Structure formats: structure tokens, C-alpha cells
Image (cartoon, rainbow, N blue to C red):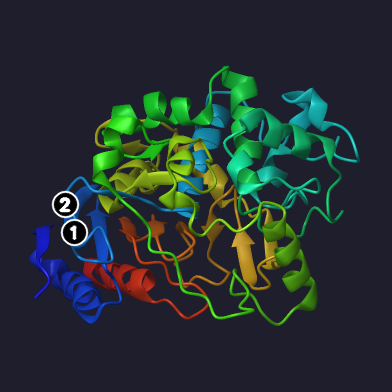
Amino acid sequence: MIEVAGTIDERFAAVGALFERNLESGADVGASVCVLHRGEPVVDLWGGWVDEDHTRPWEADTIVNVWSTTKTMTFLVALMLADRGELDLHAPVARYWPEFAVEGKADITVANILAHTAGLPGWSDPVRPEQLPDWDECCRRLAAQAPWWEDRTRSGYHALTQGYLIGEIVRRVTGTTIGAFFATEVAEPLGADFLIGVPESDEPRVALVIPPRRASGEDPLGTGGEVDALALARRALASSGPIDAAPLERWWRAAEIPAANGHGNARSIAAAQAVITGRGEANGVRLLSEAGVERLFEVQARGTDLVLGIEMCFGMGYGLAGGLMPVGERAAWWAGHGGSLVICDLGADITFAYAMNRMVVGEIDTRGIEMALTAVACAG
């Protein structure tokens, strides 16, 4: 039997049953799940192992690379700066980053960056994986290149580049890195144990991801159907090289790669994103006005994503109802490569988060969404 630890309200027992089933079946090796209802923790569970060889148990403070779930932290930072009047989401990026206004990018807005409509899903001048920690170089190349398409109503997922683009805007506005800003302005006030850049001192509690075993010729994004989407996805991926196993390297974990290398667990993800569900306030701390939260529901792009090749609906960063994910009309969400997930459902007053080490790519993965939908049902 796999030992599961933590606490759970009996009303949400069905969520715990699914969590245990995933661990017992091997669908998960190690994982954590957290549900906040009306701001209160009703599920906070962890279990399994931090490694594929089952030598070390997953502990209460274990953290793991959650890939693109990290993006929700960058969205939160952008919304906070907009709410403070320091950042205009509809202003040209070049207002804050003058070097960006070349090669037809003068009119690209901050909102275009947030909604993946900027046409910069990869580097035209490719970088090697080990160059990703070089912030200035990654940003310089993005600022110098031309967009890959012109229609600003069409999204094309900026898997890695979005973090540099948002992060550089934040740096120009605040004078500090987005990882440092998030740490002092979000994580510390909320008590959220989430890191964008892992200090050496936190290394002992990191669970390394277990990359997927890919079949020969398999598309890394799991896209299919649209030739254009496949071509764009492959071009974007090729522009930074293969990175599935990068979180196994210390250089990746130490860097700030804010679209993809945040480390946390379900409890810390939920603690930060509860600000959205709480209409700007969580754990007695207000980081946004209610109007500031409402801005994320402004639809920026809807339709087949040019990179992912699937139906998406983007607000200010967050995914919204009307796309692939079966969420309520008043819900915002995003997921990470391999399976991590966060959903802020304002209608149900549920914040759901799931983080795990075994990545699933190229096949249907229902681990997180099944628990999330069950949590909403349990909330009534």
C-alpha cells in the first residue's frame, strides 16, 4: 500500500480516493493535491515517492518542477502591476522595453504577450538549452526578431518565450527580476512555498521530474491534425532544443525560467492562486482589487491555437472556459507540461492544484482534471 499523508474534509473524500487510486495504480509515482473551498483547505494530501526507484518518500514540503503552471505566477504579477497603475496591459511593450520596437513589433501590446498572440513562440535565432539561464541573451534575441505571424487575434502558445517576455517587462517596470518580485510581493506575504529559481539550500527537498519515454518520431507537444500547428510547434521546440530532462540539471533549477521552471507543490500553488479565487484576497492578504481580478476574464483570443493545434480561449494570461479544458464560465486555469494543473473556479469558490513528478505526454492524461471536477462536484 502507498502511504498518503495530509488532511481532508470528509465532504471531499472522493478527491482523496482518486488521489490514492493514481498512486496505487502507478499513474503517479509521487504527487500532491490541494483544494481550497471558500479560502479554507479541505484537501491537502501528498504521497508516493520522490524518485522512480522508490527510495525516498514524498514529504509535506517536497517541491517539484511544475513546468507551465509556473506561468500563472507570472500572470498574477502582471495583474498586480496593472492594478497598481504601474503597467498598462494594452500599451505597446516598447513603452517599457524600447529595444522591442523593431521588425514590426512596435504595436505589440503587453496583452498580446499574455495571450500568446505576439507571434514569438520561439527564437528565430535559436538558443541551446544551456543558454536558457542567460536572461539578457534570451531577451535580446526575442527583442531583435520579427513575429512569426501577423494576426494579433490568433494565439500560438509561447511555451518558453512567454516567461522571458513577461519577465523582462516586469524587470523594466520594477527594476527587479520577476522571480525576486514574486518572492517578496506574492510568495512571502501569502506563505506560498513556491520558487522561481531554487536556492542550493532547498535542493534536498526537490523531487526530480520523471520525463516521459517517447516513441520514435513522437511529437513532443502531442499535437496533431493541423499541419501548420505541427510545423510551428516543431519550429518553436527546435529553437531551444529538447528540455524534457532539463529539470534534472542543477543549472535549470537554479535559473529563472519563469514560463517553465517554477518549483512548488499543490499547497503552494493553491496558496498563491487563491488570490484569484478570492477576488484579490487570500489568507487575509489583499494583492489585487476585485476589478483587477476581473481583468483576467477579458477574452484576448479564442479559436484553434496556431502552435498547439487545439481549441483554446485566453484571457489575460489564464486559460478560460470555451477552450479545451471543461471549466466553468467563472474559472481560470493553466496546466504544466506533463500533468500539473491549477484551476481557480470563482463560481464554485474552489482553488484546485495538483503537482506530480511522473510526466505524461502524448497520451490522454486525466489525473488532474478528474480530481478537479470531482472537487467542484463535492463543493456542490
- Residue 80: give x, y in percent of width and height: 50, 31
- Residue 271: give x, y in percent of width and height: 30, 43
* Numbered circle sitting on residue 46: 1
Mark 2 or 1, nearer chain start:
1
Residue at 64% of width from left, 72% of height from top?
A: 311
The answer to whether one can see residue 225 in this image is: yes
Residue at 65% of width from left, 46% of height from top?
A: 161
Question: In this orientation, which residue lies closer to the viewer: 84 or 247?
Answer: 247
- 348 displayed left or right of 165: left
Hey, what amino acid is under mark 1?
Answer: Trp
- Residue 70: give x, y in percent of width and height: 46, 47
Q: Residue furthest right?
A: 103
Q: CA distance from mark 2 to mark 1?
A: 7 Å
- Label 1 crowding class (10 Å Cα cut-off): few <14, some 14-19, many 20+? many
* Numbered circle sitting on residue 27: none
- 221 displayed left or right of 52: right
* Numbered circle sitting on residue 59: 2
Name the image quarter holding the C terminus: bottom left
Mark 2–mark 1 CB contact (< 8 Å): yes
